[in-house]
Amino acid sequence: MTQEELFKALVAHCKEYGFIFPSSEIYDGLAAVYDYGQLGVELKNNIKRYWWEAMTRLNENVVGIDSCIFMHPKVWVASGHVAAFNDPLIDNKDSKKRYRADVLIEDHIAKLQDKAEKEVAKGKKRFGDAFDEAQFRATNPNYLREAEKAEAVHKRYVAAEQSNDLKEMRQIIVDCEIVDPISGTKNWTDVRQFNLMFSTQISNTGDDNDKIYLRPETAQGIFVEYLNVQKTGRMKIPFGIAQIGKAFRNEIVARQFIFRMREFEQMEMEFFVKPGTEMEWFKTWKAKRLQWHENLGMGNENYRFHDHEKLAHYANAATDIEFNFPFGFKELEGVHSRTDFDLGSHQKLSGKKIQYFDPETNESYVPYCVETSIGVDRMVLAVLSHSYNVEQLEGGDSRVVLSIPAPLAPVKVAVLPLLKKDGLPEFAQKVVDEIKYDFNYQYDEKDSIGKRYRRQDAIGTPFCVTVDHDSLNDNCVTIRERDTMKQERVPVGELHDIIDKKVNMRNLLRNL
RNA sequence: GCGGAAGUAGCUCAGUUGGUAGAGCAUUAGCCUUCCAAGCUAAGGGUCGCGAGUCCGAAUCUCGUCUUCCGCUCCA
């Protein structure tokens, strides 16, 4: 199977066994929105628990919060999202390329200004030392002509941008005869506003002033609660705040199953540190986060760091932890050194002092911040795509097995009476009673035992417990392990410990 | 958003020149009995993605539309 076929098979498998369904399927579905089914939600919850416990329990200076999706609109002004993700876009119909309309116009203005400056350069060359630049700029007709052209376009552009007049933007591009650098044609579509953030209104009058956004990242919820948590939790720097929650981004193209969705879930942790120490902590969290991934045992060679060359407006260092997905190495988690950009912006815009008083040095400062940010859905996809295997067995048989790390598996154990008579189901029920308070289990008495094993393999259940006639006499059952298919006969009383040893979350949390 | 391909039962697909929709697997019930799927019997399940049009008659022809996949584009 090629990687592409494998990925398709995985997507089909996810639907067939109740992990992940396309949303609203009975109405033809909704593009790039997926629902988690009965098994998917268990896997997802286990992943979230693994992260939450690693963060908040194993670091005594990291606490969690749960902030809202709705936030004050000014939050997104301070964070830079309103300014940075509100782009007018235009397509060239011939080259099929998309451009930012404002960039096209700005480039054009720059070209015109360039022409004017060339006149100045010419003047310099001609008059040498006698050249009076101010005089030249004020009087030279060639220069003035070019400069006026640039100024005229600039004025129109600023007016259009301020009034958000998309038709005028397009008209400027048409009037200036701006051509697509690739196709060289002027065959443009309309200018459309693209906003990364979804919006709605909080009152029901539809007034534009009541517009609020669905958060495009959970991080800002942490920043605006920084003061509350720091004070009420008596937190001393360095300390962190962790959060798991939904975020929404109106991506132009959402693709690759649950890898890029418009509604998705993040697990973010903001770690507040003393300015100047952020690089140390950046390194620390890079290592800690990689270890968290490696503890899953999905192959250390499947992870790599990708350091950012080009940094975002808020960062002074950034790296991605990439995972080897079926479609190649792609970002799974980001570790960013965000400086004091966020807290600083909120301090400025809100007028509230957001500072930390350091009792050791007696100074106040806006803390710097190191962020770890991982997509829950990407993590689910990483686990599923790595776990999905089609194994060839002796005798030409094959089985589909999800080798999900046992502590993350949706179902931990299946209880299977060999026959559904002779008192075996009744005995099996007693086995269920033995384990049901501690482990998610399935009971199945339908079809042959081999078939039932395959069904459990397909959903990644680490253990199958089989009850046979001997069980009634010796109180022992057969426990069969998913990956090795090895069987062992054990007393019912020992089941709990055998299963627990393998599926307990502490197996993953060690050494973190 | 552009280009290409696809959409018939839960899944994989068949369906002839337009003439009342099929198979295998799966599901449910019963039988059989058995430690690594595919034994027997029966049953349920389909507005043929959706909407128009042509036609006496459309799963089939035409147009539109939605969704999915692939490639571009986008991705602080």
Image (cartoon, coloured by chain):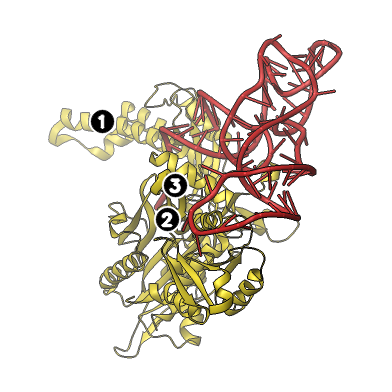
Which subunit holds the residue at mark 1? A
Check the image and name the residue furthest to the left. Answer: A129
Check the image and report above or below for A138 versus A204: above
Residue carrying label 2: A387
Check the image and report above or below for B59 versus A300: above
In screen coordinates, is A202 left or right of A10? right
Q: CA distance from mark 3 to mark 2?
A: 16 Å
Which image quadrant for residue A105? top left
Q: Colour of chain B?
A: red
Q: Quadrant of the N terminus of chain A?
A: top left
Q: Amino acid at mark 1?
A: Lys
Q: Amino acid at mark 2?
A: Ser
Residue carrying label 1: A118
From the top left corner, tell me how far across and down residue A288 is, in percent: 32, 70
Check the image and report above or below for A133 versus A245: above
From the top left corner, tell me how far across and down residue A210 is, in percent: 67, 59
